[in-house]
Amino acid sequence: MTAAPVLVARSARAGSQPVGVWASLLRHPSGRAGLAIAALLALVALVGPWLTADPNQTSYDTQLAPPSAEHLLGTDQAGRDQLARVVAGAQATLGAALTVFVLVGVIGVVVGMVAALAGGWVDSVISRIVDLLLGMPSLVLALAIVGTLGPSLRNVIIALTVSGWAYLARLARSHALGAHDRPDVIAARMAGVGRVRIAVGHVLPGVTVQVAIAATMELSAIILGLSALSFLGLGVQPPTAEWGQMLAESRFALTQMPTLALGPGLAVMLAVGAAVLISEALRDVVDPAWRRG
Amino acid sequence: MNETNGVVTAPVLSVDGLDVTYANGARAVRELSLALGDGECLALVGESGCGKTTVARALLGLLPRRTRVAGSVRIRGTEVVGASSRRLRRLRGTDVAYVAQDPYAACDPLRTVAHHVEEGWRAKGQRPPDGQVTARLAELGIEDAQHRSRLRPHQWSGGMLQRATIAGATVHGPALTVADEATSALDADLSDGVLAALRAASNALLLVSHDLALVAKHADRIAVMYHGRVVETGRTGDVIGAPRHPYTRALLLAAPRPGAGLPRELPGTPPSLADSLPGCSFAPRCAHSGDQCRELLPLLADGVACHAVERS
Amino acid sequence: MTGPVVEGSGLSVTYGQRGHVHHAVIDLTVAVHPGEIVGITGASGCGKSTTLRLLAGLEQPHAGTVRLGGADVWAGGRTPRPPRPGYVMPVFQDPVASLDRRWPIWRSVTEPLTVGRPRMSKQERMAAAREHLARLSLDHLDVRCLPTQLSGGQCQRVAIARALVAGPALVVADEPTASLDVTTAAGVTRVLREAADQGTALVIVSHDQDRLSVLADRILRMNRGRVVAEEVLRPLVHARRGTDE
């Protein structure tokens, strides 16, 4: 068998080995940076609260203290340790952002696939709803929803989900429709494979990856939207710490203690940065690597 | 360059020991040497991934950055390897021209065909002389060129449009024309006409192709590439009529011929360009390979690089 | 089964509207018998690909009928009804794109076998894939490979294995060797010939007339939607069918 060794040489070729999305993400420079920041933020959110002071412990002796060895980021108007509040805010902010991220992703994929698969009037109705939602400024829509439901973190999550899934659903629908004429799908159809099995086996994986990329790009918008709504006082309720709300409070002390905005501001920046880096890396990794091998 | 008796007999193209390694480690061209004289047509033939397109790109100075290039490529005596982009720009069009594979992809769909032909002059900051566009198109066998040149590319057939891109590429009568698979995007029965037109419009012509049978009808000489190296080269009649390298024979046997039986396949796949085998790259697929072939690289001697030929 | 595998009669397809009408296929009649290879050739835009889609039951003709195994495919209206699932199977031009790039090849090859048998285990499917790939002399392939790890010729033979695995009556191939190197195209040509020798009917669209002339039993030359010439190269189809029975 002369062909065998040649074949081994070929498949052992550097770069031809199709590696998983995770592994290639780790190889990508900005993917690595993004994942590192994300891991750091996750660690802070999970472990941080045990290491820092009580974020809700008020102390009216040390209001608006400057950064010091005792309070690394200073204290706020109520004398609470700002570092402890930034760390505590990580859980609220990132937890809410990730919840919205997962919700919009899942709803987007499911609704988009159903529209593409069902076709006919189902598709028309879904597409009109999507068009309607995309026609509205998403933050205004979210504001209106929280305004109706009342301010709370849960309602902010609902509002951002309602205003965020439409774009992803449209994306999922167009990718699913595009798969209809793919050779592997035609072959499956001619072999007699059922529509649902084709959709799950051949179409869903590709659509999921594309939506995941787009949703990761939206993650930064979600974090900012969350902070914006909290900033307006519609998100978490005091005394729970949340970055957007902390930024809003630091505004009142901007002239007296400008460093107060530093902690939550940097935290939002890091989280958004990580999301942007990961989404860019994901796009690079999934597209050319899969196509060219 | 080669001055004999005071007369400059610089060949149009001389490639000497060209070696190209891409940034990803693929060594696509290995110690390759070629020469091409005035009015001559050389076909560079090989399967996909043999490095033939890389040779074409190297001649045009179109290799990506961070590619390591060694050896020398001279066009009319001017060194291309390591030349500045300004110098390369000056070479293109006047000394070396390029004809792409897919004429529709090579043309801007919003511009007329005449615009694309005129581009040859505009690229050099000149105004196209009156009537020249029509004349050039007519020379390449396009009827009613006056009217047709005002149409857009999609209104032209592939074979005709490829003739127009040839006309545009050769307006300055370049010394060398490089055509990379110039007919593989066209219907098979149009290929011969386009290649004949290409030959007529060019001085020296390098045809890069995977189709040995097709180029055999148009080229004076053939060089067969495998894994970055030329394994056999010679006059077209000799290479086709009496192929000596086992790979050349396999290529000819694999092509279907009317009246003959089923074409014979060559088992296995070529080694990756990132790998280097100690001996002959073709040895793993070769029916005549011996121990020597696996250990020692055969050198091109008398137009063929094969230990089995040396032995006999 | 002695009748033709596929029979198209009076097929016409017209595209376009508002006075700008393009007749892709005009009044085309053709029948393909078991074990026969029919080649269709012609310049681009002559209607050969449309004809292939018609015979495969992938496109509904505007006039005429397509009978697969004697039954009108379009009898049920807008949904094609082949005699059984997998009666017609396709082979495409781009070998890499014709396989799901996320699936190891054992999954692609055995997908047609799972129709009506969704509970086939992974072990069974891998074994079946190995067996069928061996028939196309691809027994050295690791069935866990992804399409991107294979060469074009290997992918195309895997795609042919998928087309043949469930025993189709007809295989339709659109330029099956056009994007392959000549050395690997030869292997694909042989595999297609062997499929016909085992009784599968093939319709192959190709611009490569030399290849069709060594591969096909009959060549239809098309121009502007019509068959303008029919060349019978090997009138041995009926004889071969006789020995099979």
Image (spheres, helix red, strand yellow):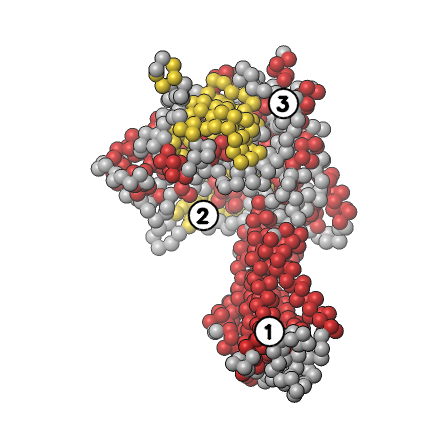
Q: Quadrant of residue B151?
A: top left
Distance between the Cα atoms at labels 1 and 2? 66 Å
Above or below: residue B231 compared with residue A202: above
Between residue C131 and residue C240, name the one nearer to us. C131
How many C-alpha atoms fall within 10 Å of the one at disc 1: few (<14), some, or many (≥20)? many
Above or below: residue B150 compared with residue B43: below
Measuring from the top left, give residue C176's x and y in whole percent.
56, 37
Q: Quadrant of the C terminus of chain B?
A: top right
Name the residue carrying label 3: B297
How many C-alpha atoms fall within 10 Å of the one at disc 2: few (<14), some, or many (≥20)? many
Measuring from the top left, give residue B41's x and y in whole percent.
42, 23
Q: Disc 2 on helix, strand or loop?
A: strand
The label nearer to you, 1 versus 3, is 1
Name the residue carrying label 2: C13
Between residue A111 and residue B33, name the one nearer to us. B33
Amino acid type, mark 2? Val
What residue appears at the point 61 percent right and 38 percent down from the top-left corner? C151
Distance between the Cα atoms at labels 1 and 3? 66 Å
Amino acid type, mark 3? Leu
Residue A264, disc = 1
How many C-alpha atoms fall within 10 Å of the one at disc 3: few (<14), some, or many (≥20)? some
Q: Quadrant of residue B248?
A: top right
Amino acid type, mark 1? Pro
Q: Is residue A164 left or right of residue A196?
A: left
